[in-house]
Each structure stands twice: as C-alpha cells, then as structure tokens.
Amino acid sequence: MSKRAADVSDEQSAALKAGERPVADAVPDEAGEFEDEFEDEFESEDEILEAGVDGRPDAEREEEEKDAMQVDQQAFIPGRTKLAPGEVLQPDYSTYNMLHTLGTPWPCLSFDIVPDSLGDNRKTYPATVYAVAGTQAEGSRSKDNELMVLKMSGLSRTDKDGETDSESDSDDDDNDMGEPILESRSIPLPSTTNRIRAHQTPSQSGDYSKPPQTITATMLENSQVVIHDVTQHLTSFDVPGTMIAPSASKPLSTLRMHKSEGYALDWSPLQPLGKLLTGDNDGMIYVTTRTEGGGWVTDTRPFTGHTSSVEELQWSPNERNVFASASSDGSVKVWDVRSKSRKPAVDVKISNTDINVMTWSNQTAHLLATGADDGQWAVWDLRHWKPDTAAPGAQIKPSPVAAFDFHREPITSIEWHPTDDSVVAVGSADTVTLWDLAVELDEEESREAGLSDVPPQLLFVHYMQSVKELHWQAQMPGTVMATGSDGFSVFKTISV
C-alpha cells in the first residue's frame, strides 16, 4: 500500500492531463498584448531545447521528479504512518500478482473457502474461488441474514503500471483483464453468523463418481449451531439445469446445547463423516459427531476449564482425538476427547489479555500460533508445553518460539500457510499482514535500512477496512482471501 499526494488544483490537473503546463495569470502590457514571461531568458534555440518544456534543464527537472516519486510511493504502515492533508491511499499494484475486491449486500464476519475440482497448484488466470459466508445484517433487519454460497470467477492478473502489452501477453495466454464475477446462492438464517466452517465428506450414497458432499456448520448470534448441505448450491454454479430443492435450504440439524452465543467452531480434518467442536461465551466446549446413518449426536458432557469465553478451537492436524482451545482468560489448553474427566491435558497461560485466534500448523504438528487482543501474536512449540510433575494441575508458563508486537489493534484472524510452515497470514483491524519466520536480519542492517521498528519477517501489508477473518486458498499457492466491513479482498502478492 502506498500513499500519494493529492495537492494539484482541479484546473492544473486538467491542464496536466491535456499535456499542458499550468501558467500564472497573465497580465497584458500597455499595447494590449500579453508579455512572454520567458522572453530573453535564453539567448538561443539550443538553450531553450536544453532547458526543457518548463524552462529548466532536463537534469534538474528529472531529479525533482525522481524525488517526488520517492515521496509519493512511501509504504503506508497503519499505526505508524499518518496521512498528510490531501494524501490518499492506493495499492501499489506492482507488488500484487492479483488483487480484487467484491461486495455483498451485508458485511460478513466469517467465511470459509470451499475446495473445488479445478485442480491443485493453480497458477493461471483468470482464477476461480468458491466459498461460504454468513452475513451480519443490521439490528432491525436480522430477518435478512443469510448463508451465502459464493463463486468468484474472472479473477484476472493485476495489470502492473509500466508493463507493455507484449510483456503482459508473453507471461501467459490466459490473462483476461475483464471484470470479476460474483455469483451467489442464499439460504435464510434467523440470526447473525458469528462463525462458519465448511467440511467435505464422501457422498453418503457410496457413489464416488459424484462430487463430495459439502456441509457447513454456522454458529449464530442466538446461540444455535445450524448444519446445512450446500452441495446442490455449489453444483448449480457449473452444471446447467441443476435444480435446488426447497429442502436444501433447511438445516440437516440444529444444535441447541449452548446457552450463550459463541465464536469457536472447527471440523476435524481426520474424521471424514464429520466431527464438530463448538465453544461458547460461558467457557463450554461440546463435541458433535455425525453417525453412519447421517444423524448428529452431541455429547452432553461439556469440556470445562476456561474461566471466560472460548474464542477459538482447533483440531490437531495429526491426532484425531486431540484439540486445542484459546480463551479470553488468556490461556490455551490442549484436550483429549477420550478423557473421562473432561479436563485439559495441558493448560498454558500465555497472555494477560484475550486470546482471540489460533492456528495449528499443517506441516509441523508441534507448532501453534496465537493472536491476542493487545495486537501481539506468537508462535509456540508444543513440545515445551509439558505438565509440571512437581505441581500437578498448575498452569505452564512457557516462552514463545517467536513473538511480534507490530500490530496496534487486536488480532482478529491468523492462519498458517497451507504448505510452508514459515509463512503466516495475520489479520488486525485495518490490515492483513504476511510474515516469513525464516527471514533473519541483524540490527545493523535494520538501522541502515531505516526499518528498526519494522520486523524483518514482515513480508507484506494489505490495507482493508475492519478485517474480520482471512484464509489461504490452498489450491492457488500464495492466494489470500479476507473479509471486512467493506466486503471481500482476494489477492496474491509477488512475495509469497
């Protein structure tokens, strides 16, 4: 993101766009003719040509323009950089491979990307992304809330400034600079969506030639959890004539075990049929399992131990019976669903403020990253979270592998890169930041570069309003999708 000066008057701006130079108000001489303000300033035509169109030597003018460009293209870092009067933000398109913004009728607090059948490791354009999202309609319009099934297509490669048509064409033949297309199918919801997650499972009919069944779990503000089958809605985007049965908009199940609303929700990646974790503001965590017959059974014995709201739940990527929870009580706990006591196996106090979000590395199962209300985020090695045998039941107070206090606002979302455990995406208030934990830079180099207050691991800053949640599109390397108060951003940087 760069900032640009906007200090040219409307009349001067029009003149410059027309290839003219702005001139001062001319004053007529006694004979009624306008004086030439540059008359006799140069003795010969050669001197005039050497001076350039504005009466100054080319070298002098070029140096000034160079300085102006350096000022205009400063990086804007929220919380540290302030815009001067008349300055506005605009993206530096040369840093993006792709950048698109898409709006919806109501803001969405949460969304999830749906895996598709278009192939893995996709790098060609235009690109396509499928997702599900839940809306946040204004108070009196709560009846307008809906679960949105989305298809974003025509996502073209960014047209970088200064790139010629021949250069653009030579990169790939699929580059289409048309407008992106957002298609949607909706399912009515009775309340605002706090969190939504999608899960794909083999077809219950046993016919594996059919696409996988896609189900969603939505935590609502009214404390209910509703489960839907959105397979028909997704199919209707790409298979002409697909009819969406009225019954497809009805929940497969409505779970009512929570007595307060919640924001923590996660499907197990190791349970094909579907195993769901949900947590609420009372600190209660429940496990709901899908049966072979397609029904849903919730264990009525909650996991207890948090003294405040459960903000995040994550299943282990490699242990089917293990999950972690993060809470506004400042702790992270690790649990085993087979435990009869329903108490945590590991209890770690890591912050004096709310732990809002958490992510478990898919590549290195002992790495966990957390984001807190004070703007700090950290990476933890679970191998150091061993219970203290000398003090059974006591909370552990380990040190993080890495910690960053760059953000000035609460961390609202965090997610490891799908295939690179050194890269993390972080969302906070008005920014999405990308980090590479493998980068090292000594203090002397930082001072010389004038970046002493910017961590060397910071790869990229993407500005958007009120960031609520972000996810990597695992089938399109380096692609990030985020939601905020002004809609969705889908982007890919040249740095990842």
Image (cartoon, helix red, strand yellow):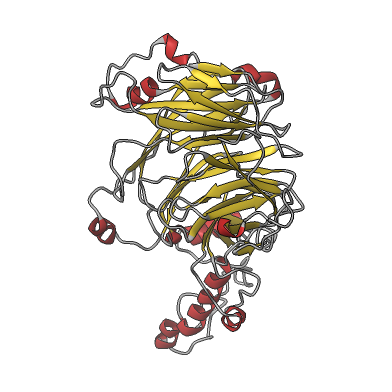
Residue 104 visible to an observer of this rendering? no
Q: Position of residue 430 (x, y in %)?
A: 63, 49
* Horizontal and vertical percent position of residue 133: 51, 31
Quadrant of the image containing the N terminus: bottom right
Residue 94: give x, y in percent of width and height. Answer: 43, 61
Q: How many marks?
A: 0
Would you say 30 lies left or right of 90 here? right
Q: Say above or below: 42 vs 6.
A: below
Query: Which of the two residues, 206 or 43, is positioned nearer the viewer here?
Result: 206
Q: Quadrant of residue 167?
A: bottom left
The residue shown at (50%, 19%) is 296
The image shows residue 45, relative to residue 389, as above or below, that is: below
At 51% from the left and 76% from the top, the residue drawn is 66
Which residue extends farthest bottom? 43
Point out residue 6 in the picture as x, y percentages from the top left corner: 61, 59
Residue 382 placement, left or right of 309: left
Residue 202, located in which quarter of the rendered image? top left
Q: Residue furthest top?
A: 246
Q: On the picture, is 450 further left or further right than 331?
A: left
Which one is nearer the viewer's eye here, 245 or 185?
245
Residue at 34% from the left image edge and 62% from the top image edge: 163
Towards the viewer: 338 or 374: 338
**In which quadrant is the C terminus drawn?**
bottom left
- In front of the other: 318 or 416: 318
Identify whether 241 is placed above or below 162. above
Q: Is residue 392 left or right of residue 17?
A: right
Q: Residue furthest front?
A: 390
Q: Is residue 219 visible?
A: yes
